[in-house]
Image (cartoon, rainbow, N blue to C red):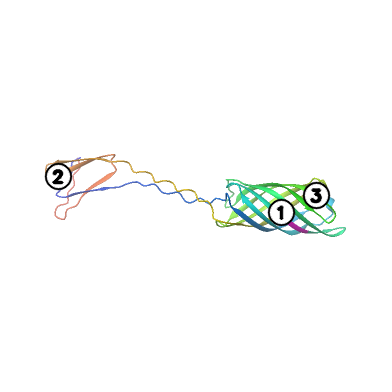
């Protein structure tokens, strides 16, 4: 490489790493979830399909797994007259990493206790659903579940939907450290009336600028 000019400047172009975007996480965060529920009761209960309300309090054990304590209150119109179903249950909610378009699937299962005017029942529920995250704090979700009553031997089916309000601040992933720039080894020497610089690795740009005489020659 041979460069000849009256004045010579050197500019180096360095690479830098980009920091990763902050990742939203729900671990160690509480949330509340009000909603509505539709129930298709087992024929043994002799009740029509009914709507009711639900409210729950949850806690994120990890980014994917949460425990949720919820209460449901549903008015039932049975052959014997009006009844009211009150239930409390503890569920495990597991969110999958995969997505269906803009929706995130999850599985749910848990145990509960249901109280009627006439009797009580211990239930096991299992189902799946989809959720949509509006932002760090607000989420919509819906699920379909089957409820098995151990005492009555009944199978009830329910669909619930509602909003999830996450409390507190999310844990933010640490930014990725910038990629260090490669070290340069520069040797400068004179050739005739000009000068020359050899760099290793060759990531620097050599240019010359002179108002009177701009010249660049590379051999």
Closest to the observer: 96 or 167?
Answer: 167
- Residue in view at x 75 percent, y 54 percent: 87
Label located before the other in sequence (3 or 2): 3
Kindly identify which residue carries mark 3.
121
| Residue 69 rendering spot, x and y as whole percentages | 68, 52
Kindly identify which residue carries mark 1.
159
For residue 50, side relative to residue 193 (left or right): right
Q: Are marks 3 and 2 in contact (CB under 8 Å)?
A: no
Q: In the structure shown, which secondary structural element does the residue marked by tag 1 occupy? A: strand
Closest to the observer: 63 or 193?
Answer: 63
- Residue in view at x 62 percent, y 55 percent: 31
- Residue in view at x 64 percent, y 57 percent: 32
Label located before the other in sequence (3 or 1): 3
| Residue 11 rendering spot, x and y as whole percentages | 25, 48
Q: Is residue 169 magenta?
A: no
Q: In the structure shown, which secondary structural element does the residue marked by tag 3 occupy? A: strand
- Location of the C terminus by quadrant is top left
Taking the view exactly as shown, the residue that stands out farthest to the right is 80
Instruction: Name which quarter of the figure residue 192 lies in.
Output: top left
| Residue 202 rendering spot, x and y as whole percentages | 28, 41
Task: Give the residues in magenta.
Answer: 70-74
Closest to the observer: 132 or 123?
Answer: 123
For residue 72, side relative to residue 131 (left or right): right
Kindly identify which residue carries mark 2.
194
- Residue in view at x 16 percent, y 50 percent: 7
């Amino acid at each position: 490489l041979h460069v000849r000019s009256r004045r010579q400047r050197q500019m180096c172009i360095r690479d830098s790493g980009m920091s990763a975007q902050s990742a939203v996480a729900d671990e160690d965060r509480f949330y509340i979830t009000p909603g509505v529920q539709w129930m298709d009761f087992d024929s043994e209960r002799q009740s029509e399909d009914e709507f009711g309300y639900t409210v729950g309090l949850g806690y994120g054990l990890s980014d994917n797994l949460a425990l949720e304590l919820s209460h449901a209150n549903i008015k039932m119109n049975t052959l014997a007259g009006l009844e009211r179903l009150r239930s409390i249950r503890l569920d495990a909610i597991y969110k999958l990493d995969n997505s269906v378009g803009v929706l995130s699937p999850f599985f749910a299962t848990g145990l509960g206790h249901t109280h009627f005017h006439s009797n009580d029942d211990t239930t096991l529920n299992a189902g799946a659903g989809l959720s949509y995250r509006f932002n760090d704090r607000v989420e919509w979700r819906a699920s379909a579940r089957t409820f098995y009553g151990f005492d009555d031997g009944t199978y009830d089916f329910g669909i619930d939907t509602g909003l999830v309000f996450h409390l507190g601040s999310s844990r933010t992933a640490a930014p990725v450290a910038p990629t260090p720039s490669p070290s340069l080894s520069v040797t400068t020497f004179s050739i005739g009336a000009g000068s020359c610089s050899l760099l290793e690795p060759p990531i620097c740009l050599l240019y010359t600028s002179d108002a009177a005489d701009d010249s660049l020659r590379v051999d």
